Image: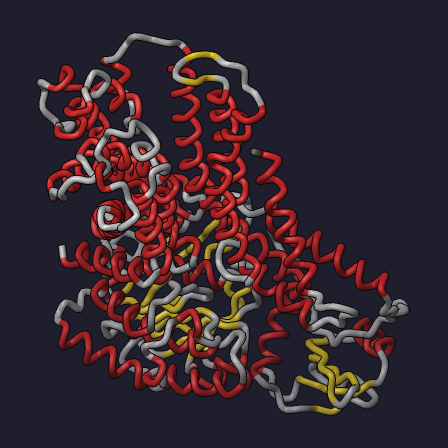
Amino acid sequence: MPLFWEFFTFELRFRFKSLSTYMYFLGWTIFSFLCVASESFGPIGSGNGKIVLNSAYANAFDNIFAGLFGIIVIAAIFGTSILRDFQRDTYQILFTQPISKFAYLGGRWAGSFVTTVFAFSGMMLGTFLGTFAPWADHTRIVPNHLWAYLQPFFSILVVQIFFIGSAFFAVAALTRKIFIVYLQGVALFMIYLIGITVFVATRSLERFWSSIFDPIGLILFNNVTRYWTVIEKNTLYVTLSPALFHGVFLYNRLLWMSVGLVALGTVWALFPMSVEALTARSQGRRAAKAKEQELAEAAPVRTPVGAGLPVVHQAFTSATTFAQYLSLSRLRMRNIFRDIPFWALVALIVAFGINNGYFAGRIAEQNVWPVTYLMVQAVEGSALLFLLLWRGFFRRSCSGASVTLISTAFMTLCPCASPRTGFRASRPSLWSNSFCSRSPCSSAL
Amino acid sequence: MALTITGLSKTYPNGVKALKNLSLSIGNSMFGLVGPNGAGKSSLMRTVATLQDPDSGSITLDGIDVLRQKDQVRRILGYLPQEFGVYPKISALDMLNHLAVMKGMTSSGERKETIDALLQQTNLWDVRKKALSTYSGGMKQRFGIAQALLGNPRLIIVDEPTAGLDPAERNRFLNLLSSLGNDRTVILSTHIVDDVRQLCPRMAIIASGELLLEGAPNETLAALKGKIWSKVVATGEEVSKIEAQFHVISTHLVGGQHEIRVYAESAPGDGFVNVESDLEDVYFLNLSQQSKRGLPN
């Protein structure tokens, strides 16, 4: 148990030293703040104008949307926690210590869980702060009740974090591949959106099973509150009572918590606490490389006998500047196209494009002509969010930090040590970075 | 404390034979293991450090079966891997504290005392609160030895500890290793022969997963006395000519010219002078003899 506690507290210390934890928290705070403080933001704010913005019902819907958009955040926190030792090459030091599987996996998982719950708790703070915004529509804001915040948060988001986090943790631990970490988040997001689109298109009147099997809750909550009046929406809670709409909310939570438990059980049963099993492929590669080196060294040690290098001519003209520009652009594009988060975002945007494109031709469940202004709205809806995400990711890669590989950091140093003509050679690289990272974003939309 | 390795063999899934029926006995002192990159040193070290299992063979450490009682070994083991990474934003102090708990040091007082002493000993006290990711190569290596000494281990394995260190750092590191005392088993794996000469009363040379030589450095040197000959030539062609005629062990550049060292029972001819043999000659001679026999795979 002391070892579990050590892994758990170390994970928390590690996470709370990381800026991203606070950025996630801030992101959710701003999101929920705007849901209350802005009349045209969020699922409730932009909907029926008589619904109270800080009611349990509104908070529940905001939380469901946070749970949907937050899939990738959950994947990033849970997935990386178990991959860290293999990415950072610390596993050799760790796995030569007398540690138990329970302490290692349990501590990492529990630390990630608490961190993610903290990050999403920004939802409660943001809503609370939003109710004090002087410009907000105060006819739609009622006195704050703690339970109206806590009940939706625990019954929706904490459960979401538990089961999605556990599933992502299990997949990351068993595959030990970073791209899977991002891919699984995007995949779940896409499958869910496409699933909803397909389900809505069938115009099915089935409400019971579709509510229970809904992993995110959009269909579930629509079904449960479908016939609620405005007053009911402003006062009632979506509770876990078996009497509420045949108990679908209770059964849904039980089902998905069980999925989380099964995921934890699977990782417990299948994760090998052996470096040899965990790194079989890289060990073989390392040994083969070492073998090549040995064969090269087996010959008597010789001083190098110099060989002549071909003669070259250097030119520093405007053509050189352009060639430098092209070369740096190529290098930067190659780096970005090899970035896993880049492709994760592209996939995310494509999913959004498909979904929004479909709904552009439907207003209030009626088919309409998808005229230009509807298509523009469909694209505009999520474009800003993604452009901000994009900017966040690739601004960091411009400065050579994180996201992209260490080689990026190293390579950014190289142009600075090379002769340049006209203007700073690092400029073209920034331009090309900005251009080539954003253009797929636009085309995907 | 004695470590006995018997008939160790290891073939990786991609067919590379890293260890071939290797047997070795290591006593209660510092033991040097030399060999070129890829000789199987790291595979051997990783096996003793409980990170991987051999296909066959056994390892015992004072009655403990290393291959089966891994947790027992890990309690008394200090391991500095050849390459290791660190977590970002975590200081040496935090990381040592984390690892100390894993080593079973649950008393916070004792832990603090040990960690403070280790940070002083490894000259990291002033930077103990700085993030490990900002450390230089030498500082990181010293942190590596500090973590390997947590919990007063009786078996210490250091794998290529001086690779990539500048001369001053290397010297400091070797001093630190030599101060570990004689009451424990220390295995120093390296491809820098000089490290072994300075530190180890016993040594072994391995190449291609096989043991080529085991003994005390002084004894192995005595066997070569009067058999190493040196000649300085100016061009690469001359080097090639001598290589074709004699058993060349190594060539070095000295002031822009090639110094050739040859192994011969008697004077090989014109221009050769008899020189004092050093441990590097022992090493290169063994390697070249093995490569002449052909590298079985």
Q: Is residue A88 visible?
A: yes
Q: Nearer the viewer, residue A349 or A270?
A: A349
Residue A252 point in image, percent of width and height: 21, 24
Residue A330 point in image, percent of width and height: 71, 52
Q: Write down the quadrant of residue B90 in the picture.
A: bottom left
Instruction: Say if B137 sits above or below A69 in the image.
Output: below
Quadrant placement of the N terminus of chain A: bottom left
Instruction: Say if B259 sits above or below B164 in the image.
Output: below
Residue A219 point in image, percent of width and height: 30, 21
Q: Is residue B1 left or right of residue A343?
A: left
Residue B248 point in image, percent of width and height: 73, 76
Q: Residue at x 55, y 62 (%)?
A: A400
Q: Residue at x 19, y 80 (%)?
A: B113
Q: Residue at x 58, y 25 (%)?
A: A372
Q: Is residue B60 visible?
A: no
Instruction: Say if B175 sits above or below A29 in the image.
Output: below
Q: Nearer the viewer, residue B24 or A136?
A: A136
Q: Write down the quadrant of residue A16 in the picture.
A: bottom left
Instruction: Say if A263 sits above or below A85 in the image.
Output: above
Q: Write down the quadrant of residue A85 in the picture.
A: bottom left
Q: Residue at x 41, y 75 (%)?
A: B31
Q: Is residue A323 left or right of residue A84?
A: right
